[in-house]
Amino acid sequence: MPKRTWELVLLGGASGVGKSVAAARIAGAAGAFVVEFDDVVSAVQELTTAEQHPALHHFDGPTAPGRPEDSWPPERVLELQIATAGALEPAALGVVRNRLTVPVPAVIEGDYLTPAVCARAVALGRATGRDVRAVFLHEGDAERIAANYAAREPASGEQTGRAEVGARYSHWLADEARRYALPVVDCRPWSTLAERLDAALEAAQDSPPPAAATDRTGVRSQEAP
């Protein structure tokens, strides 16, 4: 991996595409550490109820089935997953702002990092003289994601419904990332993923500012098309 110049990397992508392994490799090679955004998601959900913040509890509210992806149409699960990700954007920005207060490099990875919030994070970094980069992993094949789940979670049985939602979500993330001028890296071929991720992060150093809406601090770059 090239010599690190960045201070913070946001690594997004759907569940089951290999973000955790990729994040650990990026962090290990650069002397950084990994922040699991899923931990933040669990914390804010624990601090709220479905009545207090329904947008954070679509999948654990009183009417949600045990495995929504097996009971609800995939388009409905995708809609709610995108809505949940949007509701979590302030928490993601909070993590970014906190990380930028310390001189320790980090990689933030998670399913619920949206391209919109990543573009705002990059804009915030540029506005404050900090090197923040973002990249999204993409795997659009539901069968491949299902195989990844089977290898990672053999006790959970077949998870074809979850994999179908994951593939759709991955396509949505990739489309949105490109709309915000953020790099998207295909997960396959696996043998070259590390090199392609390194190249995407390196190229991001000299890329134009991403198209980002104004965030809550007033930091602004170009409007998204």
Image (tube, rainbow, N blue to C red):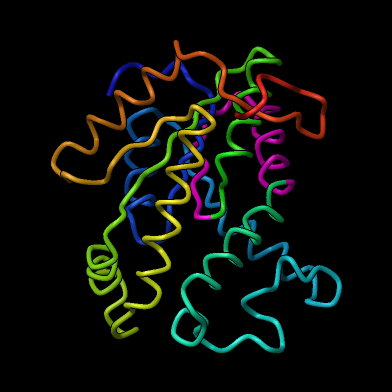
Would you say residue 150 sits in the magenta stretch? no
Q: Is residue 137 depicted above or below 14 in this figure?
A: above
Question: What residue is shown at x 48% (from left), y 44% (from top)?
Answer: 34
Please tell me which residue lies in front, 43 or 93: 93
Q: Quadrant of residue 216?
A: top right
Would you say residue 104 sits in the magenta stretch? yes
> 147 left or right of 118?
left
Question: What residue is shown at x 70% (from left), y 16% (from top)?
Answer: 128
Question: What residue is shown at x 71% (from left), y 33% (from top)?
Answer: 97
Quadrant, the N terminus: top left
Horizontal and vertical percent for residue 43? 69, 63
Please tell me which residue lies in front, 7 or 141: 141
Horizontal and vertical percent for residue 166? 40, 63
Q: Residue furthest right?
A: 52
Per the rendered image, the range of residues in magenta is 90-111
Q: How many marks?
A: 0
